[in-house]
Image: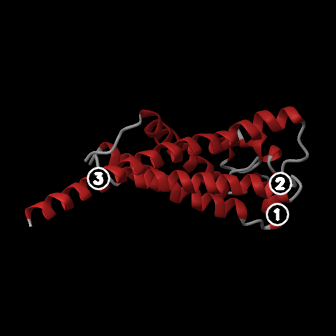
Amino acid sequence: MAPKMHWWISLWFAVTVPVIFWDAGYCFLRPRSMKGGDLHWIWKPYAIYQDIDYIYGLKALQEGDGFPNAQSLLNVLETLLNILYLSLAHRSRSPAAPLVGFASATMTLSKTALYWLQEYFCSYCSIGHNSAFDLLVYWIIPNGLWLLVPSLIVYQLGKDISDALHVAAAAGSSLAGSAKKKQ
């Protein structure tokens, strides 16, 4: 049975692939990707963001904070799962596609929740210096998308997986009932 297709899930996974690779590149190539670095031209918008979120800034780099690169490595793994989902869903129409998409979205959601919780438990140590406006526009809204959309994907693909399991269970009990009748 081919998986249900949800255009918005495929769109999210397709659009986030280059975004995540771009973000990971910034983190892995610091300080060259930062303001003043020879590769900064590729990541110009980060000139603002590295001052909004110190995890992306000079402070974390100088302190040897491993979180940005650990997060980026997980981002790359999630993105590889996103690519696998797109291939399974659109090329081979594999029934495994929803499971792969569910796993990837769960990873994204969990990692993003950890990112937010880290800020809460360190008393907003990386973002607390911002004005309410800057925090809303440059941190809460963009990072909130990484909570909202993966939550919706987890819900939708979880429902699809559950529905498929119910269909399979019903078919299995129907077959078992037919087999007993033949005996």
Residue denoted by label 3: 170
Q: Amino acid at mark 1?
A: Gln
Circles 2 and 1: CB atoms closer than 8 Å: no
**Which of 38 and 165 lies nearest the eye of the viewer?**
165
Q: Quadrant of residue 10?
A: top left
Question: How packed is label 3: few (under 14 Cα within 10 Å), some, or many (20 or more)?
Answer: few
How many numbered discs sit on the rendered protein? 3
Within 10 Å of the Cα at label 1, are there few (<14), some (14-19), or many (20+) other Cα atoms?
A: few
Residue drawn at point x = 25 percent, y = 58 percent: 172
Left or right of 150, for residue 100: left
Q: Which residue: 69% across, 53% down?
A: 113
Name the foreground residue: 60 vs 110: 110
Closer-to-camera residue (9/76):
9
Task: Give residue 25's position: percent from left, percent from top.
Answer: 60, 53
Of the two numbered discs 3 and 2 on the same chain, state the one appearing first in sequence: 2
* N-term mark: 2 or 1: 1
Task: Please identify, in this view, whether the residue under mark 3 or under mark 1 is nearer the observer.
Answer: 3
- What residue does disc 1 label? 62
Q: Amino acid at mark 2?
A: Tyr
**Image check: 74 left or right of 53?**
left
Alpha carbons under labels 3 and 1: distance apart: 58 Å
Q: Identify the coloring.
A: secondary structure
Q: Quadrant of residue 3?
A: top left
- Residue 26, position as x, y percentages in the image: 65, 51
Q: Can you identify the residue that label 2 sits on?
A: 120
Measuring from the top left, give residue 131's x and y in whole percent: 90, 37
Q: Name the front one of labels 2 and 1.
A: 2
Alpha carbon distance from label 2 to label 1: 22 Å
For residue 139, above or below residue 64: above
